[in-house]
Amino acid sequence: MARYELVKRSVALITLTNPPVNALSSAVRHGIAKTMERALSDPKVTAVVICGENGRFCGGADIREFAGPLRGPPLVPLLDSIEAGEKPVVAAIEGVALGGGLELALFCHYRIAHFKARLGLPEVTLGILPAAGGTQRLPRLIGIPAALELITTGRHVSAQEALKLGIVDQVTEQNACEVAVEFALRAVAKPLSSRRLSSLTTPCPPNLDALLEAVTMQIQKKARGVMAPLACVQAVRAAATMPYSQGIKRESELMATLFNSGQARALQYCFFAERTAGKWTLPSGAQWNDIKPREIRSAAVIGLGTMGRGIAVSLARVGIPVIAVESDKKLLETGRQMVIGMLERDAKRRGVSASHNLLKFTLGLQDLKDVDLVIEAVFEDMALKKSVFRELSKVCRPATLFCTNTSGLDVDALAGVTDRPQLVIGMHFFSPAHVMKLLEVVCGPRSSSEIVATAMSLGKRMGKVSVAVGNCPGFVGNRMLKPYSDQATFLLEEGATPEQIDKALEDFGFAMGVFRMSDLAGLDVGWRVRKESGLTGPDVDPKNPPRRRQGRKYCPIPDMVCEQGRFGQKTGRGWYMYDKPGGTKAKPDPLIQNLIEMYRNRYGIQPRNITDQEIIERCLFALANEGFRILEDGIAARPEDIDVIYLFGYGFPRHRGGPMFYASMVGLQRVLERLEHYHQAHPDVPHLEPSPLLKKLVACGSPPVQKWREHIKTMHSHL
Ligand code: 3HC
Ligand code: NAI
């Protein structure tokens, strides 16, 4: 796992060989120990270079080993011997030096980076801290403010920035290993004492306390309830205020508090879940690694509204020529200006030039005859979408792939009106489409494996986290959202306020509670859907008992809010009030309180005191319960897929791992008991009735989330 060679007669070249990222597994640590010992004891060797195989220095500790007991040599004593040696050791950094990888480089006396390399201490994103000396050595090297920022955010820096900060000694466009060998030869005669970071004093700013306080407050505001960044601040404080030997002890004490925490487990689960999500399998057996996606050289977007604009930008910025279509001249011109403005702002932010020449705007579908792929983003109206797809079948060449960005309509029904149902798929983007990372790829029963592969690969090319899901109303994300938001409105009826519910959810970790989020998205969208499905409006059967629709409990408060023209932020009024239309600062509105009170009086509802615990349990257990049904129905292949959808599309707090992981951490037995309890109290709310899969998993001893698949029937798979 670490190869040893003698080069230029006197330089020991140690290459880490643990593909794909040369993670510091126990075998690699053994390898480093053995090869370093050999290099330091061989009198022929005057200097050492450490590099990684396949152009990647090292991706850090092997995260997969965190779940088990520590095996192999511990990292810090091993790295101490590198620093303490009398022969210069140079790290040749290509690709990445992340986490323990960068810490290894910080124990070396010199660091040479290839100009394309990225460096960083991303441990905080895994719920831990850089515990191989990173929190003590980086501040000594680059000072407290810069080290604090890198360690508390986990941000990766480019080689150029690393040079500017003083993390590396040289950046090269040539082979970093060869450059490092030459560098090492020149370093042989030089004294090493000033190159040993452990012997340096941390350069300390005069306002240390104020700086640490400000960063702590910033973290508490941005990452409410997240432990690791706060522990990182404490570790960096130790680097500033303690000698190295004590600081390193403090670092390891703080790591001990984080290492086995639920947050660390959740964040590490997220790391792997994100990577698992791209690995789709269809009932036919076709899967991600054996189907070749089609190359997409041109695309079209139909409808330049909220979604179409962002989708056009997402395609153009990765170099795909786009033809954008609108329904009339004025809308086309507005859409054109918006798309170009968005593309320019995006390019400016990324420091590249905007790719205007890739965009064409037209009113005629006939201009799409030669494109490789079309993404339809017109209004959420089945008849309209069908007419668009009928028309497309006539004008596009037979090989063109058809995608719909519907947020919940039947993808197969749309496929059915085309001349190529096997080439039709859903690509469900999230708003704003050029910003949000999630893409649900909705596979209809007739979608071919080739189109699934192509949509997944196009999503990846656009920088999205793509998840393949089955076709059902609302797919995965929006289907689960319904029980979650229904619970929130039922809690309003029973005695809670929008701000109490939002606060409980935000304290849990959501960036926004359900009501603030609805105000942001626009309340009219859901109102229109409810009217179309006969839940409210003139089509409702007057014989319906109040507060019941279609045989189940229904809360009309959201409709009453919309009837007053309160559509959320865009109208300056919604569940909250805002200083102006488009304002973002939400203030509780006494009118909403009155509306809810009048409603309760009308139906004789006695408000009761509702605890935050009840809010969390009712909203989140109902959410997870629907997730279990989705797994049962074969709409999602794995709990990881559901969690990834909620993390990237719905702002579920990452340190909780996603709704399914959260349920497993609470304990499936407890989730089952609480759902049974709430269902007994609300028998007319089917979403609270525990799903058969949840019951089955509990009966099987509540296996960990990674093992649920073994208990899920696959015969119903829609994927
Ligand atoms: N440990 C174990 N497996 C790892 C790993 C690691 N540190 N880093 C990546 N992998 C695995 C991935 O799970 C994936 O496995 P798969 O093929 O089975 O799905 C494979 O390596 C390739 O990874 P990516 O798909 O992410 O490849 P990319 O090329 O897109 O990205 C990367 C490469 C930037 C290195 C990215 O993998 C990454 O960010 N890795 C994690 C880096 C990190 O957080 N390091 C800190 C670890 S904790 C630590 O070092 C503690 C220390 O302080 C003691
Ligand atoms: P929107 O109302 O903002 O835009 C729709 C656009 O389509 C309008 O500009 C309209 O002029 C245009 N259009 C209508 N008929 C057309 C035709 N025949 N030819 C060309 N253009 C036509 O709607 P939005 O929000 O962009 O939604 C579009 C689709 O995306 C819907 O299916 C919606 O459900 C879905 N969606 C919406 C999300 C959101 O947050 N807004 C999120 C995810 C999906």
Image (cartoon, rainbow, N blue to C red):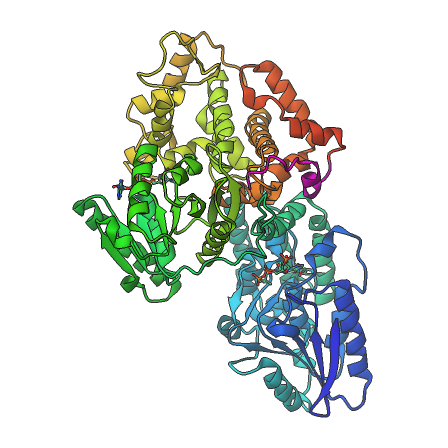
The boundaries of the magenta stretch are 703-719
> Residue 76: percent from the left, percent from the top?
75, 66
Give the quarter of the figure containing the C terminus. top right
Give the quarter of the figure containing the N terminus. bottom right
> Would residue 380 be found to the left or right of residue 457 on screen?
left
Identify the residue at image location x=32%, y=46%: 393
> Residue 448: percent from the left, percent from the top?
49, 48
Residue 711 is covered by the magenta coloring: yes
> Would residue 585 be found to the left or right of residue 4 on screen?
left
Identify the residue at image location x=59%, y=30%: 629
Q: Relative to the observer, which residue lies in front, 137 or 464?
A: 464
> Residue 397: percent from the left, percent from the top?
33, 54
Residue 96 makes an appearance in the image: yes
155 over 287 or under it: above or below: below
Which image quarter has ligand 2? top left
Q: Relative to the observer, which residue lies in front, 582 or 543?
A: 543
> Residue 125: percent from the left, percent from the top?
59, 53
Farthest residue to the left: give it. 329
Residue 284 is covered by the magenta coloring: no
329 over 458 or under it: above or below: above
Q: Relative to the observer, which residue lies in front, 696 or 340?
A: 696
> Would residue 130 be found to the left or right of residue 42 on screen?
left
Residue 610 makes an appearance in the image: no
463 over 22 or under it: above or below: above
Q: Relative to the observer, which residue lies in front, 475 or 564?
A: 475
